[in-house]
Amino acid sequence: MNKKDNIEEFLRDNRPVVKDDPTFLLETNRRLKSVEGIKAEVDRQRVQGHMALIVTLVIGIVIGAFAVLIGYMHPFDLNQMKEGSLYNALVFIETWKQYLIIPVALLSVTLSLVLSLRRNKAF
């Protein structure tokens, strides 16, 4: 059963009182057109949002690849700097770099789940 059948069934069951006004049909058509305009605008904004998401993803991948390329082309020598908190942070990252991907992956999966659930509840 589609929406048209549901509307027809509702009208048959309730038998609404309609005025014998000649502008009734014109007013109804005007309201339907405005609803269709709103639906078209919502669809346009949804497509625009998806395109923004895709563009952001592509830009992030390109910038990340560029950063990795620069890091491999110009590696940082830890022996040049032996003190300070930056040195300690770099030593920590260098020591545990194979395990740092786990929290990053967990955060990205959690964020995507939260955003997708929030999006589904909004619509």
Image (cartoon, rainbow, N blue to C red):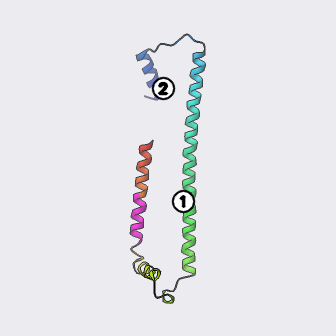
Between the C-alphas of marks 1 and 2, the distance is 40 Å
Image mark count: 2
Within 10 angstroms of label 1, few (less than 14), some, or many (20 or more) residues?
few
Instruction: Looking at the picture, tell me which residue is in the foreground, 43 or 86.
Output: 86
User: Which percent across, then down, holds residue 90?
Assistant: 45, 80
Residue at left offset 57%, top offset 26%: 31
User: Which percent across, then down, holds residue 26?
Assistant: 61, 19
Going by the numbered disc 2, the residue's amino acid type is: Lys
User: Which percent across, then down, holds residue 43?
Assistant: 55, 41
Residue at left offset 43%, top offset 56%: 112
On-image quarter of the C terminus: top left
Residue 100's disc is: none
Which range is magenta? 100-110
Instruction: Check the image and report above or below for 33 versus 85.
Output: above
Say what secondary structure mark 2 lies in. Answer: helix
Q: Mark 1 points at which residue?
A: 57
Within 10 angstroms of label 2, few (less than 14), some, or many (20 or more) residues?
few
